[in-house]
Each structure stands twice: as C-alpha cells, then as structure tokens.
Image: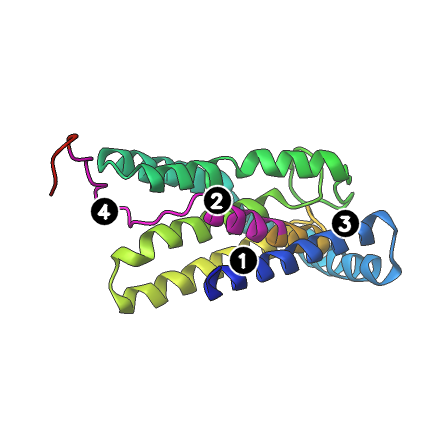
Amino acid sequence: MTPRKIWLVISAAAAVAVYALMWIGYASHWNWLTSIDSLWLEATHRFGAARPGWVTAWNVFCTVLGPTAFRLVTVAVIIFSLVRRNVRVAMFLVISVELAGLVTEIAKYAADRPRPITALASAPSTSFPSGHALGVMVGVLALLTVVLPVVRQPLRALLVACGAAVVVLIGVGRVVLNVHYPSDVLAGWALGYAYFVACLLMVPPSRPVTVTDEIPAALGTSR
C-alpha cells in the first residue's frame, strides 16, 4: 500500500471515529455536546428570528449550492466522461456523488434524530447527519478529484479554496437556519469524507476527464 493510500485510510478512519462520537454523544445525551448544540442554535435563532432577510438569503444559498445542485453538475460531467470513453471517471462519480443521497438516507434512518424545534426554514426527513453537509462534502471532493488534474496550477488553488468555502458555508448555513444541530453538520462532514475516500479507493478515477480511454487493440495486434 502506497503512503498516499495509507494516509487516506487513516484519515477516513479518523472521520468515522468523529461520526461515531457525534452519534453516540447524541444518543447518550452527553452534556457537553448538548450544551454546544444548544448554545449555537439559541444564538443563531435569536439573530435570525429578528431578520427574515438574513434567513431567506441563507435558505437560498443552501438550496442553490446544496447536494441536488452538485448531483446535477455531476450528471453533466458523467455524460461528458462517457462521450470521451472515460468509463472509470463516470463510474467514480456515479458511485460517489450520485449515490451519496442513499448513504444519507440510510444514516438518517439509523439515527432517527428529530429536527430542532426552533427551525427557521422547512426541511424534510430527520436531522442526523446533515444531508447537505454530507452531500456537498462528497460532491466537492469528487469533482475536485476529477477536475484538478486537467487545470493549470494557479487555478487549482482557487478551485480548492472555493470548494472548501462552499463546504464550510453550507454547514454553517444549516445551523444558521436551525434545521440542524452543529453535531449533525460535523457528523455529515465526517461521514461524507469517509464515504468519498472509500469510493476513491474502490473505484479510482485513474485518468482525468479529458483523456480518452484507450481502445483495446485487436487480438494478435500490437501498438
């Protein structure tokens, strides 16, 4: 196993540990976790309840840059990859980004945590983990994995910075809207990262999206 794979496995294991800690903490009603969740929700609810425009802006932001938007963009990249005969990239994106919603629903069903009663916006399903945090984390990481190898160096840093900003702001937005506890968001980030790493190791997109896979040579011929 290469050093890169070892690092990925260790970081994914740490993320799973964080996810488990948040779940156990919620289920066991740990005082320190409950206090942190309540403190952030009370502060953001108090501020948002008096500022409808603030709430609307965050709600629009979380909708426009939510998991659904990333899945739609990913569909376009998948189609482009298939046109370029890069099946491995398409498979990686299908398994990681497009199936992340299924992972979210399974995780939500298992935890079955109710939404905060102070929610400032409507949100379906249960609370733990945050589907937005999980889906956007997977979407950003998967798309960066595919796109970074084909862009120039100066642009790579900008894309990474923008991706990190979107991941963080979406998580913050879900707490600002009081539709998630902070522990939900942290758990979503952790599970999303661990799932991304699992997909990356199982179905590595070994070639960038603009490179066409080689057409196998006919039997008995060589190139």
Q: Which mark is residue 90?
A: none
Look at the numbered disc 1 and give the secondary structure of its residue: helix
In front: mark 4 or mark 1? Answer: 4
Q: Quadrant of residue 80?
A: top left
- Can you see residue 175? no
* Among the two numbered marks 2 and 1 on one chain, the one whose residue lies closer to the N terminus: 1
Magenta-span inclusion, residue 211: yes
Which residue, given by chain and number where applicable, does mark 4 sit on? 210
- Can you see residue 80? yes
Relative image position of residue 207 (x, y in whole percent): 29, 49
Magenta-span inclusion, residue 210: yes
Whole-number angstrom distance, CA of label 4 to CA of label 2: 21 Å
Whole-number angstrom distance, CA of label 3 to CA of label 2: 26 Å
Whole-number angstrom distance, CA of label 4 to CA of label 1: 30 Å
Look at the numbered disc 2 and give the secondary structure of its residue: helix
Q: Which mark is residue 23?
A: 3
Q: Which residues are magenta?
A: 191-217
Q: Which mark is residue 169?
A: 1
Which residue, given by chain and number where applicable, does mark 2 sit on? 202
Quarter holding the C terminus is top left
* Among the two numbered marks 4 and 3 on one chain, the one whose residue lies closer to the N terminus: 3
